Image (cartoon, rainbow, N blue to C red):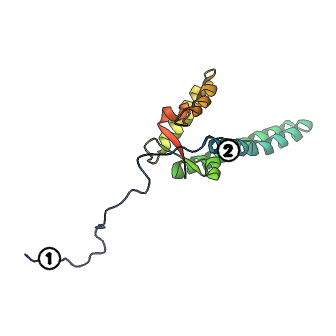
């Protein structure tokens, strides 16, 4: 039987198998030091946003209360900008500014990309926000990183792991 070849169609689906772009399977956690460095860089970014507002507010104390309102707006604008930048980086790369600078990112425990809902909703809002208000939760959360798999409690809640890029 003779093979029938159709003419080339530039709009046809590719014939080659599509490979996943992200590794799935065994994931190796990032070092505790890199995670600490990323946390410290995120903290520095947070205070860098607050520092101009603190300066404006300290100058405003000697003059009028209007400058204190300006400091509040400056602070709010900076925090919103930092939140938007972090949300964009989390959505696109699974990273905050600190994690990006340290060369680490957040993925699911199986190595797949983590969605923004899981990252922001479970990891940050629930685990670090709501549960963070429970006495000693933050300490217990942090101490979990000394386990064999190097995952904090918020990682376990969101089924995430921090890995090298």
Number of residue marks:
2
Whole-percent x, y for residue 126 in the image: 54, 31
Above or below, 16 relative to 137: below
Instruction: Name the residue beneath numbered marker 1.
Output: 4
Q: Residues within 10 Å of mark 2 (few under 14, many from 20)?
A: some
* Res 74 seen here: no
Q: Is residue 33 left or right of residue 147?
A: right
Sequence order check: which comes first, mark 2 or mark 1?
1
Circles 2 and 1: CB distance less than 8 Å? no
Residue at the image point whose x is 55% and y is 32% from the top: 147
Instruction: Name the residue beneath numbered marker 2.
Output: 37
* Res 60 seen here: yes
Q: Is residue 41 left or right of residue 117?
A: right
Residue at the image point whose x is 28% and y is 69% from the top: 12
Whole-percent x, y for residue 156 in the image: 50, 33
Q: Residue furthest front?
A: 148
Determine whether the residue tagged by mark 2 lies in a helix, strand or loop: helix
Q: Is residue 75 left or right of residue 103?
A: right
Judged by depth in the image, the label closer to the viewer, 2 or 1, is: 2
Whole-percent x, y for residue 107 in the image: 49, 45
Task: Quadrant for residue 9, please give it.
Answer: bottom left
Task: Quadrant for residue 26, please give it.
Answer: top left
Disc 2 to disc 1, C-alpha distance: 61 Å
Q: Is residue 26 left or right of residue 146?
A: left
Whole-percent x, y for residue 80 in the image: 65, 44
Q: Which quarter of the rendering shows the N terminus?
A: bottom left
Above or below, 70 relative to 156: below
Above or below, 125 relative to 102: above
Determine whether the residue tagged by mark 1 lies in a helix, strand or loop: loop
């Amino acid at each position: 039987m003779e093979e029938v070849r159709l003419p080339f169609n530039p709009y046809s689906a590719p014939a080659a198998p599509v490979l996943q772009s992200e590794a799935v399977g065994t994931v190796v956690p990032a070092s505790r030091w890199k995670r600490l460095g990323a946390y410290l860089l995120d903290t520095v970014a947070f205070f860098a946003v607050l520092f101009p507002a603190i300066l404006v507010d300290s100058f405003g104390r000697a003059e009028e209360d209007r400058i204190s309102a300006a400091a509040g707006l400056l602070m709010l604008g900076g925090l919103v900008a930092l939140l938007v930048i972090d949300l964009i980086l989390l959505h696109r790369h699974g990273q905050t500014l600190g994690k990006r600078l340290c060369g680490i990112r957040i993925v699911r425990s199986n190595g797949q990309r983590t969605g923004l809902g899981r990252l922001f909703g479970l990891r940050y809002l629930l685990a670090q926000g709501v549960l963070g208000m429970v006495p000693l939760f933050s300490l217990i959360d942090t101490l979990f990183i000394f386990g064999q798999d190097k995952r904090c409690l918020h990682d376990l809640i969101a089924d995430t792991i921090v890995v090298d890029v």
